[in-house]
Amino acid sequence: MSFIARKLIGTLGVVLLFPSLSGAAIAADAVEAFYKGKQITMIIAGGAGGGYDTYARTFARHYGKHVPGNPVIVPKNIPAAGGLQGTNSLYTNSDHDGLTIGALTSSITLDPLFDNPGARYDTLKFNWIGSIGKLQNVCATWHASSVKDMAALRAKEVLVGGSGATSDSAVMPKVLNALLGTKMKVITGYEAGASTELAVERGEIEGVCGLGWSTLKTARPDWVREHKINVILQMGMKKHPELPDVPMAQEFVSDPVKKQVLELILLRQEFGRPFAAPPGVPADRVAALRNAFQDTLADPEFKADAAVALMELDPLSGEEMSAMLTKAYETDSAIVQQAARLVEPVQQSAK
């Protein structure tokens, strides 16, 4: 190739490259200009003082400095109905401009798949930003309870507390009763957050089933530190490293169909502490929110705060969440129908 030809090709490459770089820079500048001087409302679909609240507020203190334009993050708790009210509000009532995001509960991810009438949103249309960590639910009783293992949990009726009728603490006992033969009776109607744990301490109920292990550690660290609870069972896709001697729910299910049903229900916990933006947010702002999410998780100051709060960091990206949810929504309808019947909202009980 002649010298002149090489020069022409090089010049053409520069001409083609510069418009691309210019376009990317303009897009980045537009996102920064949009967010500068503004605030992002973060809907927290959990009660004040609970595990979801702790995770979301700790994250919110650092997130804004990684979003272009450094907007102020303003948390707002909407905890009713096991996270459904906050999720519905994010989907239908917020402006789809990137100025409202949600720190949601793990259970809401599959509620539309299970035809929950309270779920007025399409999970697959959310712009998933990412999840801070997985959620390993446990069944635990107060240390004074005579129910300390699975044999006792199957032999005796045990009063456990739940918040919203669709919350894990209300639904998971029903699931385990049907698939594992336990005999838990759920007393619902407690406020989301610390209310259920206070009821356990007061002796109104014997325990709770469907509460996240990480939630216990952040909201009630003394329960763990001082061995105030009997952790009887854990529910997730694999054992938590801190609970090597606590059996998994799957160990007590021999029927292969029932095991598939249980694992579909437990899949929700893989999404743990999810964050989302509503549909319709411009793609460049979604990308910025996702990048800021990853940058926050890598931020040493956030990691230090998370360690103090005993938060477990096991993140999923927004893209990973979207792919996993798409696959979940393709599950065989027979399995979905059986799971749906088990996760129907529990009827409210008087406390």
Image: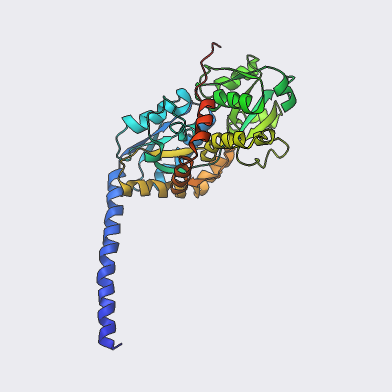
The x, y position of residue 69, in whole percent, is: 33, 46
Q: Nearer the viewer, residue 46 or 109?
A: 109
> Residue at 69% of width from left, 36% of height from top?
251
> Residue at 69% of width from left, 33% of height from top?
252
Residue 36 seen in this snapshot: no
Query: Measured along the vertical axis of the image, is residue 87 above or below residue 294?
Result: above
Q: Nearer the viewer, residue 339 or 286?
A: 339
Residue 81 seen in this snapshot: yes
Relative side of 189 to 241, left or right:
left
> Residue at 35% of width from left, 33% of height from top?
91
Q: How many marks?
A: 0
Q: Quadrant of the N terminus?
A: bottom left
Relative side of 86 to 203, left or right:
left
Query: Measured along the vertical axis of the image, is residue 212 above or below residue 198?
Result: below
Q: Quadrant of the C terminus?
A: top right
Residue 75, picture quadrant: top left
- Specify how the rendered protein is coloured: rainbow
Q: Nearer the viewer, residue 250 or 128?
A: 250
